[in-house]
Amino acid sequence: MKGTRLREILKLLVSVAICQAAGALGSVATGPSIATWYATLEKPWFTPPNWVFAPVWLTLFVLMGIAVFLVWHRGLSNRRIKVALALFAVQLILNVLWSVAFFGLKSPLAGLVVIVILWVAILMTLLCFFKISRSAGFLLLPYIVWVSIAAVLNTSILILNL
């Protein structure tokens, strides 16, 4: 019993750490462009202040980590769980790629292409998670809301800076 509990705690920590690592990787592409390129862009009136992004993403990555743990906790023998975890991995990679496309390449157009694909991948992941664990599905709702806002922001920046 004690060993099982420890294994589950380790799974939770690994799940959150993987999500936070993805966030850290994305920030490598983002960081250098904030005070330079991004600062020069025309932005819509609803653009959040820069200080908002880090705490929101940290929180979202924790929620994502808990969600993936809740699915992983159900075991890996079920095909539906394997598909859900694979979708989660795909959307996590796309999350990092958005930072590379938008900030690293300094391309709102490339960012828009990636964020649309990311949004679809999140939706698919969320729907799969709901079927396995309602709690896991609910934990991804703030994430898709934030990415929806980011997609509108990305689109607005692209239009304002043509």
Image (cartoon, rainbow, N blue to C red):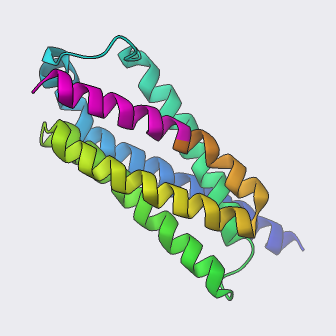
- Identify the image quadrant of residue 39: top left
Residue 35 point in image, percent of width and height: 19, 18
In this view, 145 is above or below 95: above
Which image quarter holds the C terminus?
top left
- Asked if residue 11 shows in the view, the reply is no
In reply to whether residue 128 is colored magenta, the answer given is no
| Residue in view at x 51 percent, y 27 percent | 55
| Residue in view at x 39 percent, y 54 percent | 118
Q: Give the range drawn in magenta.
A: 145-162
Depth check: give the residue in front, 160 or 75.
Answer: 160
Residue 116 point in image, percent of width and height: 35, 50
- Identify the image quadrant of residue 149: top left
> What's the magenta bit mostly, secondary-structure-wise?
helix
Residue 85 point in image, percent of width and height: 55, 71
In this view, 69 is above or below 118: below
In this view, 160 is above or below 84: above
| Total number of numbered discs in the rendering | 0
Classify residue 119 as left or right of residue 159.
Answer: right
Which image quarter holds the N terminus?
bottom right
Classify residue 51 as left or right of residue 5.
Answer: left
- Asked if residue 133 shows in the view, the reply is yes
